[in-house]
Amino acid sequence: MLDDTMQQLIAHFPLGFVASVTPDGGPAVSPKGTFLALDNTTIAFADIRSPGTRRNLAADPRIEVNFIDPFARKAVRAAGRAVIHPKGSDRFIALHPRWVDAFGDLANRASALIEIRLDHASLIWTPPYDDGTTEQAMIAHYKTRFAKVYP
């Protein structure tokens, strides 16, 4: 489901925008910066400061996540069902070293790991690619734009 290109995008840009469902049925989107692709059908993030998202997922495990490469203007859209593994649980203990390796001391703030078993995932890209723009041209353009914002 997650091919190598998708897994690399998530590894390089682990900030995922998580969409969950509120108790009253409304949408909620929240960024989570500690995502890892565990395998080709599973992604997960560390719950460091996510009480609303965690509450939403406990009531309704449906979730969708979007990851964006802001330079290449490509993204991964992934959806599935979340399982919450609280700190101290067997699954948390088994998985947590991967977050320590990837995120260092930040991983020690995790109160849970949220594992997402994917139903589907897709790679999406910006329309200029349809017109023949190359990835190298897109990256060069956005490097210049971001350099103006952060000189």
Image (spheres, rainbow, N blue to C red):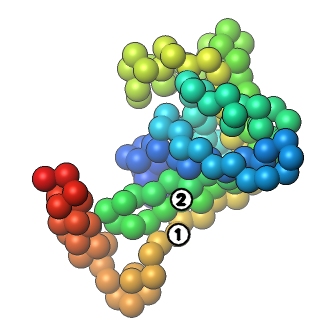
| Sequence-first tag of 1 and 2 | 2
Q: Secondary structure at mark 1?
A: strand
Q: Amino acid at mark 1?
A: Ile
Q: Position of residue 69 (x, y in %)?
A: 39, 58
Q: Nearer the viewer, residue 106 or 76?
A: 106
In this view, 42 is above or below 4: above
Q: Along the horizontal axis of the image, is 137 left or right of 16?
A: left
**Distance (Cα) linking label 1 and label 2:** 6 Å
Q: What residue lies at 62% left-to-right and 17% top-to-bottom?
A: 111
Q: What residue lies at 47% left-to-right and 44% top-to-bottom?
A: 15
Q: Position of residue 86 (x, y in %)?
A: 70, 18
Mark 2 surroundings: few (<14), some (14-19) or many (≥20) residues within 10 A: many
Q: What residue lies at 24% left-to-right and 76% top-to-bottom?
A: 137
Residue 76, disc: 2
Q: Amino acid at mark 2?
A: Val
Q: Along the horizontal axis of the image, is 83 left or right of 13?
A: right
In this view, 62 is above or below 129: above
Residue 124, disc: 1
Q: Quadrant of residue 52?
A: top right
Can residue 39 be spotted in the picture?
Answer: no
Q: Nearer the viewer, residue 31 or 140?
A: 31
Residue 59, disc: none
